[in-house]
Amino acid sequence: MPTAPQAGAAPAEPARPTAAQPSAPALMQAKSRWVPVDWSELPGFAEDRLGQAWVAKLRSCERPAPAWAALCPDIRRLASASEAEQRQWLMGRLQPYRVESHQGVAQGLLTSYFEPVMNARRQRSASHTVPLYRPPADLGQRKPWFTREEIDSAPPAQAALRGREIAWLSDPIDAMLLHIQGSGRLLISEADGSQRLVRVAFAGSNEQPYRSINQWLLDQGVKRINPWPEATKDWAAQNPQRVNQLLWSNPRYVFFREEPITDPQAGPRGAQGVALSAGRSIAVDRQSIPYGTPVWLASTGPAGQLQRLVVAQDTGSAIVGPVRADYFAGTGAEAGQLASRVNQPLRLWVLWPRESSRTSATP
């Protein structure tokens, strides 16, 4: 996995930017406005390694929205083409639109997430006492379901989850990290002593509001919360009597399903239903950008300069607003280090099919 996105070399004969389509109108979404622009407005577009992003777009074509279905044969055909050819196709078939709020604000926030890798045990033990649960049978009958505190302490919630354990972790902060990221890989020690690498994927939540435990720590006067979760574990070791208070400050609780890992290079499935691509997939507010849409992302901050083509393939409870994205950094510790540094200003441009853009941007 990359430790930080790197801009590649420009192709030998880059395509020349073309002017914005004169007849392209601004397109209104529920939470955003798309304003047509010239390709030259996209910073770094001529230098991006588009072949890396093509993998993410191919995956979106496994479940294409109607606006993209007619273009997917071209996208598949160009998978082995040169980056110059891919760039020329993008500029010929798609129209860039700057994403703004309805009030014209074009700057938002970029954060990042990743897929943790953790050791686990199939059965509870003296060292592994923190469960990861499948959804309870009555999850859809009670909305919202019990809070995190009630799940840990209330007999009705505990009875509903009895027998639903997938695996057991040794640290509640690790479990919280999985809940926040929404998925992860587990190296599970089975009862017979064998080990299996599996994925636990998001399968539902208690639909309680998400509250940042980092913000809770800041409110308590803790000055160092990064790198996370190491700094959080340090605080927990020094304040064992307050660990439950920390955990229960976030009432949202996530349930998982176990999945085999058939492609170690692919990330978990996002909300679009396709595997995420490290460094090329983002989570968005679907009321601003439809799933499967290629997006030009530009952001500068603690994680460095990010200027690249990504694809909207996921969402999250905290990813709300017109110019808001969560960048999928990949799998493992290095991806986690990158994700912990990304909290910086953001600009976005959607790339939309020219023919479809004349009528609607509805997927």
Image: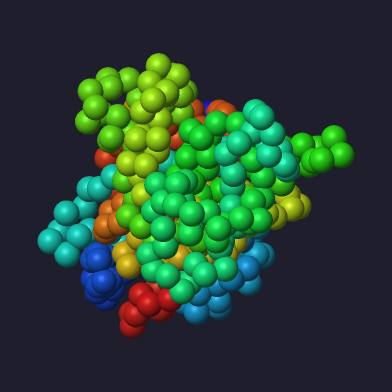
Measuring from the top left, give residue 289's x and y in whole percent: 36, 64
In the image, farthest residue toward the bottom: 359
| Front residue of this view, candidates 221 and 197 | 221
Measuring from the top left, give residue 41's x and y in whole percent: 29, 50
Measuring from the top left, give residue 288's x and y in whole percent: 31, 64
Q: Quadrant of residue 191?
A: top right
Question: Is residue 30 among the parts visible in the rendering?
Answer: yes
The number of numbered badges drawn on the structure is 0
Residue at 51%, 35% (x, y): give it: 172
Residue at 40%, 16% (x, y): give it: 238
Measuring from the top left, give residue 156's x and y in whole percent: 48, 59
| Front residue of this view, candidates 359 and 278 | 278
Q: Quadrant of residue 99?
A: bottom left
Q: Quadrant of residue 339?
A: top left
The N terminus appears in which quarter of the rendering? Answer: top right
Q: In the image, is residue 174 above or below residue 163?
A: above
In the image, farthest residue toward the top: 238
